[in-house]
Amino acid sequence: MTATSDLEQLHETWSRPRTFLGWVSDVDHKSIGLRYLFTALTFFLVAGISATVMRTQLAVPNNDLVGPRRYDQLFTMHGTTMMFLFAVPVMQGLAVYLVPLMIGSRELVFPRLNAFGYWCYLIGGCALWLGTLLGHGPNDGWFNYPPLSLARFSPGINIDLYGAAVPLIEVSAVVGAAELIVTILGDRAPGMSINRMPLYVWSVLVMAFTVVLSFPPLIVAGWLLELDRNLSTHFFTPEGGGDPLLWQHLFWFFGHPEVYVMLLPGLGIVSSIVATFAGRKVVGYLLVALSFTLIGAISLGVWVHHMFVTGRSSLGLSFFSATTMSIAIPSGIQIFSVLATLRYGRVRLGVPLLFVLGFVFVFVIGGLTGVEVASIPFDSQVHDTYFVVAHFHYTLLGGVVLPLLGGLYYWFPRLSRRLLDDRLGIASFALIFTGINVAFFPLHIAGLNGMPRRVYTYPGGLGWSTPQLVSTIGAFLLALGFVVYAGNLVWSLFRGAAAGENPWNAGTLEWLPDDAFAKTPVVADAYPLWDGKLKLEASQLSVERRETLGTGTLDALPEQRSVEPGPTIVPLVTASGLAVAALGFVFDPLWVLVGGVIVALALVEWTRPAPAEWDMDYARSGAPGAPPTSWVAESVGVRPPILKGALMLFLIVGVMLSTLLSGYYYAAANAPTWPLDGMDPRPLLLGILSVLLAAAAAGALVVARRRVRAGGAGATWAAGAAVASLAVVAALIADMHRLDYNWATNATGSTEFAITGFMVIVEVALALAAGVVAAYARRGFFNAERFSGLTAVSWLSVFVALAWLPVFVTVYLGTRIF
Amino acid sequence: MLLARLRLVPLALWAGHASIAYGFVAVDCHVRAFGPPSLAPTGVRVALIVFTLAALAVSGLVAVLSVAAWRSREEDANGRRGFTAAFTGAIAAASVVYLTWSLVLIAAADVC
């Protein structure tokens, strides 16, 4: 084939049908990324409208524009939307679009998972806002603290909507993060060793790890809250031995890292813009990458600073005060890197750089007040006042929104091949920058004057009226700025000047011409378009199927070719099933079963190989000298993406299980006696049987894999593992059935049943996976060359068997130990 | 080889130290509120100091190994080995600073 026909074939291979079904089946990272961006910006608009209504209400004392009930829903949905539906998804959407382009890959590693995440997000977000428009929106704040959020004090479905939809949305964030990690660590262009990754990609990598470690606890917490509200469990109800503060721990273990999850990509965007507009590499590449990592790591150890006034021990709090203050060091490195890069570069003052300069000013103010509220005595005085509102708006608008707006301006030509209008860009920046400072600086004063947050109105004469009025004027300036910015986007999309391939003369790979898609970029620097050493080599990837090049984690040497799936409706069906389970639970717990069956069937279809994939010649095929496909890579000692994905799954499930175990020990430590109410310890027999059966399932799958690898058949062993896993489920259910207490008895019963219930779900999933690989093994899909699917399931079984150890010690021995 | 295995440990120590130390103090204070048995304040401090010193030893070891790896790097055409050694060493050093500061807190602050 000629080069032109190769390119045409490649575009044909990577295209989708131009029909509605084709649209909902699309799994391409650029399409999904744009959908994330559009959806998140729509939610941003809605949350912004709710903010202007609140600011209008607060403009003058004793105002009655909005009543207290409506105001509660407004501030709850403003925070919930900004945090769950805008800031995280918009950053993730941008990453989904840009990361493959920046690392020289044709696609994310798990495109169907990417689409699944988007559908979860869209369904969850729409459910939240549909409920709000019908008058049933969440109304207890975005943090949703019990006991106010328990059924006794919030009897409507408002909070159920939160407890069902928010975990669904966070599932989207977690799967998105997992696929970004595997892609970044295994799909970079040859030569892009870990020290040559664009800094934006570094920021996304750390952000993704932070998501994987910190978001699962909120998913679990949301489920526990729903159980408390609908099945009378006692995780957060003091009368049953639960503790409302457990929610605060779980929520803020997620909630504070979430701030950095939003901030980190913002810092990455800043690094990209500054380098381009200073015309030089960012000063201190190593230190900037290091500071991203430190910010991500430290963010996991600061959550208790949201609980300084909850009466915890002073020494315990002091650790969190110290870690919170220490985060100023890596944040400071970022700021100094920006300033030094500008100082030593040849600066062009483009509009994206204006937003970066705005970021420096606003974020530094937010950071300084952050150090102040990290001090326990100071925080005790300003806690829950408008000072905190001012602080976090400075941080989030400065660290997230301004870089994002700069980033959208910067990458708009890459997204649309058109330039934004600079006059409108400057006007929008001026309005937004002025609006931020006029809207939020006065709130520091209102807070220091003692004005509490979350009040729908206030009396005059307390020194609060003027700051509130000025703040409202600023909010409208800010809103006007966003309107001008949005108008610029829409106008330029249709009428903007043609941008050309690389209008800013940037140095990273996303600015390669579209035709470079057909080549393999080989890089020798973090800014490959600047160093003159970039090679575009003839690709060894097929043009007739969706192949991406897999490379090593640290040195990015070519290792394998992954064949990615094309358009499919399965991700939408799976997300719909999960939504049926999550949202249906609000009305009847039986919907969980219906949703579970849909998800299970969809996953079976998800794992079904395409007809051509049964042919080993097809599985091996490739250009002479090309690396092996990921189907057979494991047989030559290369770890394929499915196994890296399995490791991410274990990490996520491990964090969820750890959350449940932590809940158990938290309840036990808080109780005067354990088990509560003089309950008898759980009989050991069925617990021991469960552990042995789980170990047997793991052993059977390990044997199945070894047999297949040696050229034999492993179907029977894999089927045996499925049966053993089902036997564990039966043993657990029998065990729960014969006890003289249940989940509703007290916190001991609730925590025990939650852990064993979780293990039931895990064992059912393992049984399903083992059954599927047994079926494929029996039909000859696995052989001595291709067995990675079997390896993944055998790893899962070993992981589950190991997970049984802390579960057994906790559930069966815990009441004997305490 | 040892450095490759320990590379991420200082990060985990930094993030985990505050949580574990906090949990330990919180549990002890709660238990004490319900009466004995509990560790005396001195016992709590000693346990925390031992834990922190152990963490310090590991972080210090990683820092030293990183410096050695950075100095002795060979065949580092793409600069990756030097980068990872410097990266790991800097994180380990930062972890050492945090843990040292924690020792001051443990010695000086009220336990409950």
Image (cartoon, coloured by chain):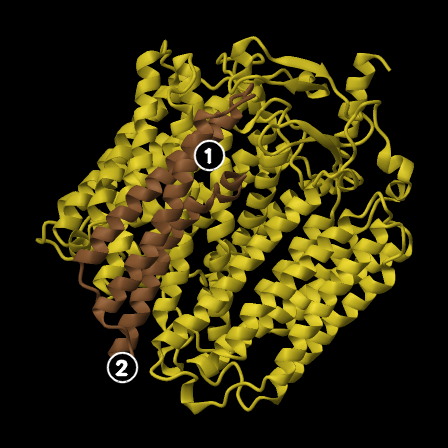
Chain colours: A yellow, B brown
Residue closer to the observer: A565 or A547: A547
Callout 2 touching callout 1 (CB < 8 Å): no
Please rate how many residues cluster around mark 2, counting C-alpha atoms within 10 Å: few if below 14, some from 14 to 19, many from 20: few
Callout 1: 10 Å neighbours few (<14), some, many (20+)? many
- Tell me: A97 left or right of A317: right
- Tell me the quadrant of the picture where the C terminus of chain A can be found: bottom left
Q: Chain of mark 1?
A: A
Q: Which of label 2 and label 1 is nearer to you?
A: 2
Residue B8 or A53: which is nearer the viewer? B8
* Residue wearing tag 2: B36
Examine the rendering and report whether any part of residue A600 can be seen: yes
Quarter of the image for residue A713 reads bottom right
The kind of residue tagged 1 is Ser
Chain at tag 2: B
Residue identifier under label 1: A203
The amino acid sitting under disc 2 is Pro
Q: Residue at x 42, y 24 (%)?
A: A285
Which percent across, then down, holds residue A307?
A: 28, 60
